[in-house]
Amino acid sequence: MKYVLCLGTNIGNRAENIEKAINSLNLLPYTDVLRRSGIYETEPVGYARQQNFYNCNLLVESQFEPHEMLGICLGIEAAFGRTRGFANGPRILDIDVILAEEEHINTQNLTVPHPRAKERRFVLQPLLDLFPQGRAFNFDFANALAKIEGQEVKKIDEPKDYYLEEK
């Protein structure tokens, strides 16, 4: 199954946090990060009194099911030292499951597509790097991106391919 994961960080060496998170995902069995969007510096959403974030999206292929992938993401966050203080606060690493191929999930622990993805430029702008046509796994996001006002994003690094061998 293919996933789109959104990474965000605003504590410590943000670029290093992203690369280490990608390396952690690539160490998982039966899991490959295929491509990373550009890295974007983004203004915080919800709580403004904190450092800007670095955000990017990953296209990941894995044999893990969506709830397992969520658990993996939470485990990686914890390994980085993430603590959950208050909503939208500073964090060393945040990994959200945005899309899970053609899956639509709405459980207590996981909603896919991510319920606020279409409201967040820091999710949709990097998604355009991975899916230039504005549509990913039957998730049309181009119109939503065009409607978002504000939420400035600044690209600081170009997309990167990791593992593109056909399976």
Image (cartoon, rainbow, N blue to C red):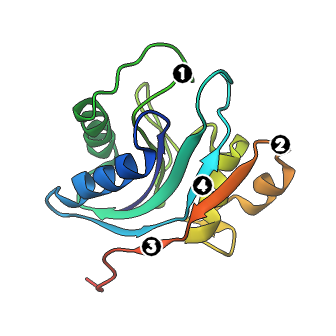
In the rendered image, residue 143, in percent from the top left (x then y), is placed at: 80, 58
The answer to which of marks 2 and 1 sits earlier in the sequence is 1
Dot 3: within a 10 Å radius of its alpha carbon, few (fewer than 14), some, or many (20 or more) residues?
some
- The reply to whether dot 2 and dot 1 touch (C-beta < 8 Å) is no
**How far is mark 3 from mark 2, CA to CA?**
26 Å
Residue found at x 68% / y 24%: 48
Numbered disc 3: secondary structure: strand
In the rendered image, residue 77, in percent from the top left (x then y), is placed at: 31, 35
| Horizontal arrangement in the rendering, residue 26 relative to residue 122 (left or right) | left
What residue does disc 3 label?
A: 160
Question: Label 3 amino acid?
Answer: Lys
Residue found at x 40% / y 18%: 84
**How far is mark 2 from mark 4, CA to CA?**
15 Å
Farthest residue to the bottom: give it: 166
Question: Label 1 amino acid?
Answer: Gly
- The reply to whether dot 1 and dot 3 touch (C-beta < 8 Å) is no
Farthest residue to the front: give it: 13
The answer to which of marks 2 and 4 sits earlier in the sequence is 4
What residue does disc 1 label?
A: 89
Question: Label 2 amino acid?
Answer: Gly
What residue does disc 4 label?
A: 40
Which quarter of the rendered picture does the N terminus lie within? Answer: bottom left
**How far is mark 1 from mark 4, CA to CA?**
18 Å
